[in-house]
Amino acid sequence: MTAKTKRVRKAVLPAAGLGTRFLPATKAQPKEMLPIVDKPLIQYVVEECVASGIENIIIVTGRGKNAIEDHFDSSPELERFLEERGKKEQAEQVRQISNMVHFSYTRQKEPLGLGHAVLTARELVGDEPFAVLLGDVIIPDRRPATQQLVEVYEATGIGAIAVEEVPREKTHLYGIADGEPAPQPPWGARLLRVRNLVEKPKPDEAPSNLGITGRYVLPPEVFDCLERTSPGSGGEIQLTDALRLLAQEIGLWAYIYEGTSYDAGDKLGFLKATVEMALKNPEFGEDFRAYLRLLKP
Ligand code: G1P
């Protein structure tokens, strides 16, 4: 480790978006609270943080997002109710949600973009590296993508973003990374040095087909890059644009992470994620598979 390298203890979870792709379901409830099988989307992301050694989670919320805070708060009445009825396991499950990790909240007052949401967390992050996890994407692997990025950061002192191949015709849905292969043990050909990043390019303008997956481990210098970033794609302050500056000024890795991501960011992706997660469920996955087979085409 270099002298400057520090352990990654904090994560920022932007959750201030209006969820317009999910209307009307998100008119009066946060998108992050939509359940995939039996857990809200944001809980999958929090669990990934915990499994990656994160100790402090900073959730960037906005108006109408109180259900997120309530979900991760303790609920003594519910716990007592379950215990009095002998439902110890359920009581323990509910208790664990609030005891998993330390939570802080800050609000983004206006929806000015993902980059702006991350910048809102500056005070709470302070002068140390941190992870960013986007709640639209769930990566339910035993070795979480965030943990893989933390390992790259802690060994090299350079920020890392998770990337994966996306279909050419879908580059306009992602930030796209142009990276130069920088193979080195133990990561081999998975490690690339970022040369350029473009937010949501048209297929014929995309510098590659490596899409940014929504997992980042970044040094605190990214906040200065965000301060200098003007509105970009969609008129919003884009994290991808600030990362381009960071890559030019101090360097950045793109890491082809090991694992599978499910994009629950729109209605079809959400349905696919639900089916995939239901099939993996140890309690009823097999029954669900049998049910799906019965469905007529
Ligand atoms: C955001 C990022 C984009 C990234 C994507 C992953 O876009 O801006 O770079 O590839 O998440 O899901 P959004 O999907 O929020 O429009």
Image: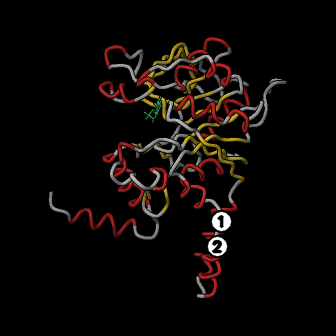
> Which residue was labeled with disc 1?
96
- Taking the spot 47% from the left edge, 43% from the top edge, the residue there is 137
Q: Residue at x 48, y 34 (%)?
A: 213
Residue 80 vertical position relative to residue 222 in the rendered view, above or below: below
Q: In this rendered view, identify the residue nearer to me: 291 or 20.
A: 20
Above or below for 49 versus 100: above
Q: Are marks 2 and 1 in contact (CB under 8 Å)?
A: yes
Horizontal side of residue 280 vs 124, given as left or right: left
Q: Is residue 167 left or right of residue 93?
A: left
Asked whether mark 1 and ligand 1 are closer than 8 Å, the reply comes as no
Q: Quadrant of residue 221?
A: top right
Relative to 78, does residue 250 appear above or below in the rendering? above
Asked where in the image residue 297 lies, by quadrant, the reply is bottom left
- Amino acid bearing label 1: Gln
User: Which residue is painted at 60% across and 87% down in the image?
Assistant: 86
Percent position (x, y) of residue 247? Answer: 61, 16
Of the numbered discs in the image, which one, if any, rests on residue 275? Answer: none
In-image side of 268 versus 262 (left or right): left
**Nearest to the observer: residue 189 or residue 203:** 203
Residue at disc 2, secondary structure: helix
Amino acid at pointer 2 = Glu
Which label belongs to residue 92?
2
Vertical order, 244 against 265 (above or below): above
